[in-house]
Image (cartoon, rainbow, N blue to C red):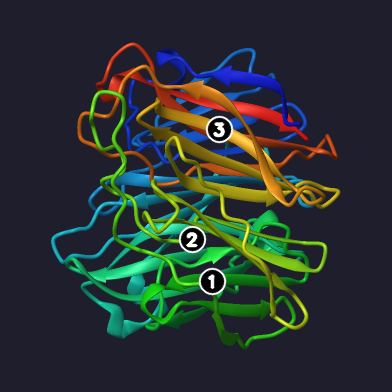
Amino acid sequence: MVSITESLRLNDLATGTRTSTINEPSVAHSTRAILVTGNWYASWSPDAGRTWQHLDPFTLFPATGAGFCCDQLVLYVPKVRLWIWLLQYSENSSGENIVRLAVSRTGGLGPWQWWDLRPTDLSSSWSGQWFDYPDLAVSDDHLWVSLNLFAGNRWTRAVVVRYPLAQLSRAQPVDRRHWSTTSVGSLRFTAGAESTMWFAGTVAHRRQLRLHRWDDADDDVTSWDVPVTAWNDRDYTSACPDGTNWLLRQDDRITGAWRAGGQLGFLWAAGRAAGRPHPFIRGVVLDEESLELVHEPDLWSEQGAWAYPASAPHRRGAVGLAAVFGGPTAFPTFTVGTWDETAAQWRTTPVAASTHSPPDQSWGDYLTVRRHIRRSTSWIASGFSLQGGSSRRHIEPEVVTFRA
């Protein structure tokens, strides 16, 4: 049984009406405050969601380059009592951009300290390239950022950058390190990392995960190719009750990953397959020591499609899920759930069902779920739905606390 203990819907005052069906909501929380970001807004609550203040990511920080663009991610790290905010900026006339990493002791309006990162800060040979599709996570000693790089519309590589948390928390010059690969992109970090960060990407045509390990104490990354059951990375058609295909943007990038109980888990969306009449969530769980396949906990339905999974273990190790369900019987529906180890199946419950389909046939690109920092058996998640109309301004972000 999955129980929703609190659900907070952000209104136009909280978002400044800068919402989108490609909402990409991220959430962070301390014992009292909540920070939510999405395309193209940020919302701050100092009182656990009773009141909200719109933070404008276009103006809160000084302008740089071609200006703020889109993707944002937020974290709160209780170990160092630090709010972390990652913002992606637009490409300039040379086809380059920056990501801005900001930290604050207080959150909200700040003060914030920040560092800008350009592709050429990592390698002088990466001129004319731009960052996209970030991921953000923490281990015991580091903050981790992953990014894709593009030259024009051509993907060139993925890069992982790590920052010492102790230096970030003191707002010192940071001794960052980075690693890159041209073999797989859209790398996703495991939530629940301790002294080791695991991250992976999918390689559909080889039926495998490309898995990587980077220990806090090491400078080297170790990589493996892990064979898994094949999946369809193309047919993501799913029609809403009005006939609209809401999964036009869907692909097989990993969007959920966790480490708990000696296991590593990864989730992504797969296209329709034999016995699976709708797109579904593909799951793979590996033994952390041997890297052998333990099981493949897919989430699928005869009635509709599952997409955009996010995942994290709570403090006692159970795995929580945020995802979207939709199809002939339902418009896109923000849903949360948990993995039932005894029954070997996902248990889910809807949070917010849309009243309309997206007119541009697009949803996504990711949701967020994090372990709750005060409640050892709970999670906090961010999602969204369309309410009362089909324009982007009918998008309503949602922050939900749930437990198993």
The x and y percentages for residue 308 are: 46, 46
276 to the left or right of 26: left
- Locate residue 139: give its quadrant: bottom right
From mark 2 to mark 1, how far is it between C-alphas? Answer: 8 Å
Label whose residue precedes the other's in the sequence (1 or 3)? 1
Secondary structure state at the residue bearing disc 3: strand
Query: Eyeballing the image, is 200 above or below 109?
Result: below
Give the amino acid at mark 1: Ala
At 41% from the left and 81% from the top, the residue drawn is 206
At 85% from the left and 40% from the top, the residue drawn is 376
Q: Nearer the viewer, mark 2 or mark 3?
A: 3
Of all residues shown, which one is farthest toward the front?
A: 275
Q: Could you tell me which quadrant the C terminus lies in?
A: top right
From mark 1 to mark 3, how far is it between C-alphas? Answer: 24 Å
Pointer 2: residues within 10 angstroms few (<14), some, or many (20+)? Answer: many
Secondary structure state at the residue bearing disc 1: strand
From the image, tell me which residue sits under label 1: 200
Query: Eyeballing the image, is 12 above or below 337?
Result: above
From mark 2 to mark 3, how far is it between C-alphas? Answer: 18 Å
From the image, tell me which residue sits under label 3: 335
Residue sitting nearer the eye, 401 or 300: 300
Residue sitting nearer the eye, 296 or 68: 296
Pointer 3: residues within 10 angstroms few (<14), some, or many (20+)? Answer: many
From the image, tell me which residue sits under label 2: 254
Q: Could you tell me which quadrant the N terminus lies in?
A: top right
The x and y percentages for residue 129 are: 25, 71
Q: Nearer the viewer, mark 1 or mark 3?
A: 3
